[in-house]
Amino acid sequence: MTTILEKSTPPVPPSPAVRRRASGRGGDGPTRHSRRTKALVLGGLVFFTLYSLAPIWWLVVSATKNQSDLYTTNGLWFSDFHFTDNLRQLFTYQDGIFLKWLWNTVFYGVVGTVGMTVVCVACGYALAMYRFRGRSVLMGCVIGSFLVPHALLTIPSFLLYTDLRMVDTPWAIIVPSFFNAFSVYLAKVYAEGAIPPELLEAARIDGAGEYRIFLTVGARLMSTGAATIFLLGFVGSWNSFFGPLVFLRTPEKWTVMVGLYSWLKVKVDNSADLTGMVVVGSLISLIPMVALMISMQRYWRSGVTLGSLK
Amino acid sequence: MALPTHPQARIPRLGWQRVMALKGASLTVPFFLGFALFTVVPMAMALKESLYAEKGSGLGFGAKTVEFVGFDNVAEGFADGRFWASMLRVALFAVISIPLIQVVSIGLALLLDAAAQRVADRFRIPLLLPYMIPGIVATLIWIYLYSPAVGPLTPFFHLFGVDADFYSGDLVWVSIGNLMAWSGIGFNMLIVYAALRSVDESVYDAARIDGASELRIAWSIKVPLVRRSLVLTTVLSIIGTLQIFSDTMLFKSMAPETITRDFTPIMAIYDWAFQQGDFAYASALSIVLALVVGTASAIFYRLTNKAPTS
């Protein structure tokens, strides 16, 4: 357990074992793998890559078509280029409600995730660095709550938020997201690996108080871990569907995902066909996510694997 | 937020170490207050709510009264044939789809591990791209791909003389399974791949000297060594699959005859709460589902984690 931890904690630089393998394998080939094995491996990877990419390719292509071409032309190749028209239509439909949804999603995501990062990093830091009575009970609550299925809390949460007058306000989305048990767990694991207790001792000898040590020493050493936690939380909030669907009633307050769902339903409810808009809207809504995750992949990858290898 | 420690706070009687630990513990307070309010309270409310039922007085005229009915709701939930039918439907789907997805994920991770580092790096992002696509958007993409009007899949199958209706009762689970595989394989692969990378290369060298083939090494060494990760991704898949909601909810828009309102357990709960307005019964069903999900995960964990490896 601890060995894995040590290997994966400073998330970026590969551990010695990995580096050794990288150099040992870069130039391998005939000695270790026969040509046929190599071809099979490559073939398998190419096949799965096509499977992964083809649907996204379809979405990109379809976003450039007008409504009638969408139905009549080959889905995997371009026809007349209408992407800019589609964009204009998307952003002007119902007084630009899609832009409003995008803004809501960003707003709920940023505010909720910043708050979550602060609350959870402080909690994880304390659980990792201090020995106090009740600590193991608290830790048990954190781990135990992983098993409580999230969607199951939704009905009683709805009743609770009704009592708190939070239903149909942004707070129903933002405030509960502050308290994320998985983030606390990640923060604790990260703090254990990243903060040498001696450093805290040294700060104490210099006369710093515990809160000050957290702000000036602990929080700084945990900045990479905090970035990981922020990123995972932001992605989760961008993708969330059930919560916003249940807690938000007014269309002006919806997120992109709920909005797209409502457009998908329109087709069934009456004769208006919004397929083209759903396609373009889907493409627009995934661009920020993919860009964010690719540019910060070292953060979320280390977060995902850190949480899983234990 | 008193920053530096007050000298008086370190009264010898309490012991400065104890004060220090208390201050550290206070950093966990915001999280656990919120955790209590937004996780523990809803759980308690679900339990309480499930003990009451709204009874119409007389012939349904006049005010409805709320009566204490004890465990009647939960018992009713346990005896609800339609609810169990939805559970069975999803369980059957899980039993078939999860192992398939896992096997493919392991295979893909082994392929990636067998490839030279340079090649693996090139394939990793395309293979992970589906995981970065928001769940709702992934579902929307596939809904359109399956659609006979817009999607390229129906004409493609026509080429082979196959008349495939992806929304029909026979095929809808295959369609959903493919969608879940598409968005899930990358994530599972990543976790298994990370576990494979942290294995020391010398283990394989030793096996090679003993004359083991690459396939044998993959099966007898690599797979057992990443068992912990496999258990984790499987438990996560079980929890996720039994709670399947947004995918089927979106499919319902396209195939309202096939996908009934209680097609999956969460859909049934959502329907009882927000269409029928019976929160008590919905809470009772939530409890039943929570028990089933918890038991299923626990049994699986027990069966697989008695584990000699580590």
Image (cartoon, coloured by chain):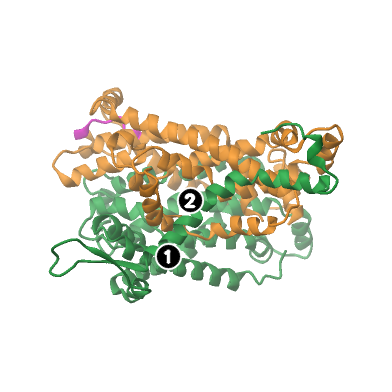
Chain colours: A orange, B green
Most foreground residue, A240 or A68: A240
| Image mark for residue B301 | none
Cα separation, mark 1 vs mark 2, equals: 15 Å
- Magenta-drawn stretch contains A265: no
**Residue A243 vertical placement versus B45 (above, below):** above
The residue stretch that appears in magenta: A60-68
**Residue B38 marker:** 2
For marks 1 and 2 on the same chain, the one whose residue lies earlier in the sequence: 2
Q: Residue at x 58, y 46 (%)?
A: B31
| Chain letter of the residue beneath label 1 in the structure image | B
The x, y position of residue A241, in whole percent, is 38, 46
* B203 displayed left or right of B260: right
Residue A67 falls within the magenta-colored stretch: yes
Mark 2: secondary structure: helix
Q: Quadrant of the C terminus of chain B?
A: bottom right
Picture coordinates of residue B127, whole percent (x, y): 51, 45
> Mark 2 belongs to which amino acid?
Phe
At mark 1, the secondary structure is helix
Task: Read off the chain for label 2.
Answer: B
Tell me where residue A249 appears, x and y as whole percent: 29, 42
Task: Look at mark 1 in the image and give the residue it sits on.
Answer: B47
**Depth check, front residue: A218 or B167:** A218
Left or right, A145 with reference to A211: left
Foreground of the two, B54 or B155: B54
Query: Would you say residue B273 is visible in this rendering?
Result: yes
Left or right of B55? Residue A211 is right
* Residue occupying image coordinates x 49% and y 43%: A177
Circle 1/circle 2 CB separation < 8 Å: no
What type is the residue that disc 1 sits on?
Leu
Q: Quadrant of the N terminus of chain B?
A: top right
**Residue A78 occupies quadrant:** top left
